[in-house]
Image (cartoon, rainbow, N blue to C red):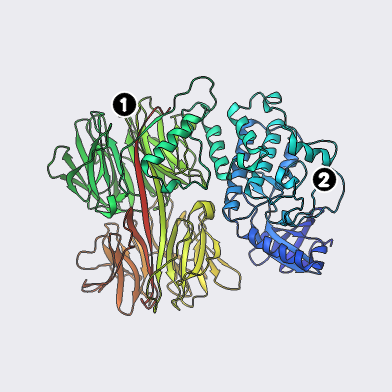
């Protein structure tokens, strides 16, 4: 069905033809509702004449649409017109990998980059149970900015050869055993034999593609299809080093492992492949590489000692990446054995002992010391004190009465100094988020003033200030620089590694990572840190002052770096992190667990007490732009509404406010049912996830102008006129039902009511430090404090009288670090809350380089 420009296909306006093939024609089109260009593939009319085939197409298109990952082509819509089904997807600019390979093999660095992206996309699809089954260079697209996109997920099952020659070797592909599926030259042996194909079949095809990227030649390619299929079953492709001497033995092994004839002997998951590729790409001069265990292995269920044994065993079995000769595996010594979170850990000055704080088995935070050669923890007398740093003379810098954040950070603490041997801390400074001792015995601190994080060294002398937030400050061993993790938007842990000298000259050393946590100087002056680029776990990385980065260690689990001793020993934690949701609706007997993929945040409850609005920020499922979704409080399947962050239902429950994580600041009203989204530009540099509608004519949100800290704003939707309604540093805006005022946490952390008129703010009487507003109702203002157990409190904003309305706490308290956020329905009869759990295992590691 050839279409001309300006023809309408459903709601889409055809602009021009892009290409055609056996699977139909592809067009560039315009979606006038969302004002964006899309690609439309119009499939052959034979699809609609076969009801079973059409039904399968719809099922597979739905499966493809459910995949949300930066390395998979986004599917927006499907439909039919004039007997021909069509599928609508994002429009890409660039070329297929097949076109890129026509000029010969790729540089190893570029091939590794593409391979890592393909493996990440495959991992995300396989996690959803979607198998490609026709992976080949024609189905890999490289955009002009270097992003790799996997095309035609789910549609490969439906392809039938409608042409001839080498480009038409795609056989009938159905899911039934005994049917040949795939494209000759990239089929797995089980596909050639007509046996059922699972995720490991895609890994064989992936290996053939990686071989071709590195060598410029197809792994299996003979004069006829029959001879090619015979080679897949019986022959091995030539050694890569015969055609490309720059291919390392480690990379050769990865390719060979993908191309094993027996699927049991291949990699067992795409995530394993991604881990190995990341190690190869980043460790040409590094130390140990740990071979990841397959995704079926329950790493999170291993005890610390079993995890250690598995880690060491796999490290010993590996070969030093990029080097030849003798290799000595690093030594991992487990230092903890209880269940809980470890916010901070340091080596003591003698090098033979270490100190850490922990919340073991749900008990309150305590500081412990233990010998580094054998775990014999001794609890120090400090209670509810967070460890910041230890000086060379043995003095402790601790945080008192701090507010626990989302990432084991304690903000708004009172800085205290205490001798290691005992004694009450001497209080020094309020509103401190971080502290580290310099070699001169002076303290560097992160001091929050009027909503801005400042690095002061020594205390009182500002060397750097940001409108974002700062973690993990570390004074260099010479005392001439301070390294830190710079995060643009609180409380998101994405960010980069930066250094500032004592004159205030700042340099950013790394790219922006999706998650970055933990930082330390090595004896040689290099910086090591833990970070994730997206779908991977946080790995241990290194960067020098010239900005050259590498990977030190990657394992199946999130790492957090705590400290590095003078002799090079590393204090490292492996963490299992989870953010889940519990919800309750009127009439229910118990709460329902409404968690999704591991990092689910509750945002609102619909006016009819039926639906939970949530954000899913687990990057393995949600990618780097996150997902906004809804599900019933009784636990129905999640419904994806949009990408980004969300905040509230509108008063009629028909819309939700969202904001994209990536791109220009803007608010987007997304319908919960049928309808088109509405975009509202926001004239600010940053906008937080907290968007709330006081009425139909205005929208309220947290945001920041250039160089300023976050505060609450109100904007007229029609005119775009914007007005700040609170001072810089304000958090948790909550509008009153009549739109006359907002409740928020002041820059000093006190619950305050800010009128939208010119009236002065009113601080709520009583002890309100850390009380975060949840929702106004006819019964007053509901607030909560992120503590354990968390309490929903009804407070009178005039008198300050507080009444506990409900306590919130999951039954399993091990590793529970906080309950946040908490949401209530407009009538305060339904509620939901996110609970945050971190289980840490602490190790002293020797031999990392």
In the picture of the structure, the residue carrying the numbered disc 1 is 566
Foreground mark, 2 or 1, reads: 2
Task: Residue 483 in the image: state x and y as whole percent.
Answer: 37, 36
Q: Which mark is residue 553?
A: none
* Residue 187 relative to residue 568: left or right: right
Residue at the (68%, 28%) spot, across then down: 240
Task: Residue 180 in the image: state x and y as whole percent.
Answer: 77, 50
Res 266 seen here: no
Element on which disc 2 rests: helix
Q: Nearer the viewer, residue 42 or 323?
A: 323
Residue at the (23%, 44%) spot, across then down: 367
In the picture of the structure, the residue carrying the numbered disc 2 is 167
Q: Quadrant of the C terminus?
A: top left
* Residue 172 relative to residue 559: left or right: right
Res 570 seen here: yes
Mark 2 surroundings: few (<14), some (14-19) or many (≥20) residues within 10 A = few
* Residue 268 relative to residue 775: left or right: right
Q: Nearer the viewer, residue 533 or 377?
A: 377
Task: Residue 546 in the image: state x and y as whole percent.
Answer: 46, 29
Q: Earlier in the sequence, mark 2 or mark 1?
A: 2
Q: Quadrant of residue 177?
A: bottom right
Residue at the (43%, 51%) spot, across then down: 706
Q: Marks 2 and 1, Cα distance to the nearest angstrom?
A: 61 Å
Task: Work out which residue is located at the far left of the displayed protein and give it.
Answer: 423
Residue at the (50%, 55%) spot, across then down: 661
Give the answer, above or below, for where 212 lies relative to 793. Answer: above
Mark 1 surroundings: few (<14), some (14-19) or many (≥20) residues within 10 A = some
């Amino acid at each position: 069905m050839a279409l001309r420009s300006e023809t309408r296909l459903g709601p889409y306006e055809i602009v021009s033809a892009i290409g055609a093939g056996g699977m139909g024609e592809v067009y560039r089109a315009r979606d006038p509702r969302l004002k964006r260009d899309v690609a439309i593939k119009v499939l052959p009319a034979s699809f609609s004449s076969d009801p079973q085939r059409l039904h399968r197409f719809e099922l597979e298109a739905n499966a493809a649409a459910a995949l949300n990952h930066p390395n998979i082509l986004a599917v927006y819509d499907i439909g039919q017109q004039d007997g021909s089904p069509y599928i609508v997807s994002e429009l890409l600019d660039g070329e297929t990998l097949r076109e890129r390979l026509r000029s010969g093999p790729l540089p190893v660095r570029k091939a590794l980059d593409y391979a890592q992206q393909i493996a990440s996309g495959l991992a995300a699809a396989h996690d959803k149970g979607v198998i490609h089954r026709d992976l080949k260079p024609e189905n890999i697209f490289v955009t002009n900015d270097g992003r790799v996109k996997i095309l035609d997920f789910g549609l490969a099952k439906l392809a039938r050869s409608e042409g001839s020659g080498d480009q038409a070797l795609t056989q009938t592909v159905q899911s039934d055993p005994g049917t040949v599926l795939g494209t000759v030259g990239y089929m797995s042996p089980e596909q050639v034999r007509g046996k059922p194909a699972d995720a490991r079949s895609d890994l064989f095809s992936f290996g053939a593609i990686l071989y071709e990227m590195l060598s410029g030649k197809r792994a299996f390619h003979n004069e006829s299809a029959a001879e090619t299929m015979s080679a897949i079953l019986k022959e091995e492709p030539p050694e890569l080093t015969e055609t490309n001497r720059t291919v390392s033995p480690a990379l050769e092994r990865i390719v060979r492992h993908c191309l094993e004839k027996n699927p049991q002997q291949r990699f067992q998951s795409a995530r394993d492949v991604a881990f190995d590729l990341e190690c190869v790409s980043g460790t040409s001069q590094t130390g140990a590489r740990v071979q990841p265990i397959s995704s079926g292995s329950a790493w999170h269920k291993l005890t610390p000692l079993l995890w250690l044994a598995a880690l060491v065993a796999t490290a010993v079995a590996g070969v030093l990446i990029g080097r030849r000769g003798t290799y000595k595996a690093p030594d991992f010594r487990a230092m903890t054995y209880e269940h809980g979170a470890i916010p901070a850990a340091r080596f003591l000055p003698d090098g033979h002992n270490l100190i850490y704080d922990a919340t073991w088995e749900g008990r309150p935070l305590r500081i412990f010391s233990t010998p580094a050669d054998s775990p014999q923890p001794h609890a120090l007398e400090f209670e509810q004190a967070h460890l910041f740093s230890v000086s060379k003379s043995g003095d402790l810098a601790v945080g008192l009465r701090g507010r626990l954040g989302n990432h084991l950070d304690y903000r708004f603490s009172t800085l205290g100094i205490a001798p290691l041997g005992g004694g009450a801390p001497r209080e020094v400074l309020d509103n401190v988020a971080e502290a580290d001792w310099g070699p001169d015995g002076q303290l560097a601190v992160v001091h929050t003033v009027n909503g801005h994080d400042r690095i002061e060294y020594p205390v009182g002398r500002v060397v750097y200030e940001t409108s974002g937030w700062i973690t993990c400050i570390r004074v260099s061993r010479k005392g001439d620089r301070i390294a830190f993790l710079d995060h643009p938007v609180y409380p998101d842990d994405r960010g980069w590694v930066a250094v500032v000298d004592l004159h205030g000259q700042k340099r950013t050393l790394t790219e922006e990572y999706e998650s970055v946590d933990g930082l330390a100087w090595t004896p040689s002056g290099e910086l090591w840190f833990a970070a994730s680029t997206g779908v991977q776990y946080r790995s241990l990385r290194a960067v020098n002052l010239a900005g050259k980065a590498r990977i030190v260690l990657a394992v199946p689990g999130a790492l957090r770096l705590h400290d590095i001793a003078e002799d090079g020993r590393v204090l490292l934690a492996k963490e299992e992190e989870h953010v889940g949701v519990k919800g309750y609706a009127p009439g229910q007997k118990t709460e329902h667990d409404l968690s999704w993929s591991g990092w689910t945040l509750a945002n609102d409850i619909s006016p009819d007490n039926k639906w939970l609005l949530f954000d899913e920020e687990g990057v393995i499922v949600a990618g780097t732009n996150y997902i906004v979704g809804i599900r019933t409080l009784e636990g129905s399947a999640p419904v994806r509404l949009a990408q980004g962050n969300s905040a509230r239902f509108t008063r009629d429950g028909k819309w939700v406010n969202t904001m994209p994580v990536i791109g220009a600041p803007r608010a987007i009203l997304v319908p919960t049912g049928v309808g088109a989204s509405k975009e509202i530009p926001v004239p600010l540099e940053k906008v937080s996830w907290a968007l709330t509608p006081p009425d139909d004519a205005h929208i309220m949100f947290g945001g920041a102008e250039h160089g300023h800290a976050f505060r609450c704003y109100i904007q007229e939707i029609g005119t775009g006129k914007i007005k700040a309604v609170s001072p810089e540093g304000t958090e948790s805006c909550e509008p009153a039902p009549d739109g006359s005022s907002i409740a928020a946490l002041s820059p000093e952390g006190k619950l305050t009511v800010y009128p939208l008129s010119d009236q002065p703010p009113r601080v709520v009487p009583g002890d309100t430090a850390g009380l975060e507003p949840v929702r106004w109702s006819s019964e007053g203002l509901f607030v909560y404090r992120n503590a354990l157990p968390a309490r929903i409190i009804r407070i009178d904003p005039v008198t300050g009288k507080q009444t506990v309305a409900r306590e919130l706490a999951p039954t399993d308290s091990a590793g529970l670090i906080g309950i946040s956020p908490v949401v209530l329905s407009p009538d305060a009869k339904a509620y939901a809350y996110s609970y945050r759990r971190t289980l840490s295992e602490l190790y002293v590691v020797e031999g990392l380089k």
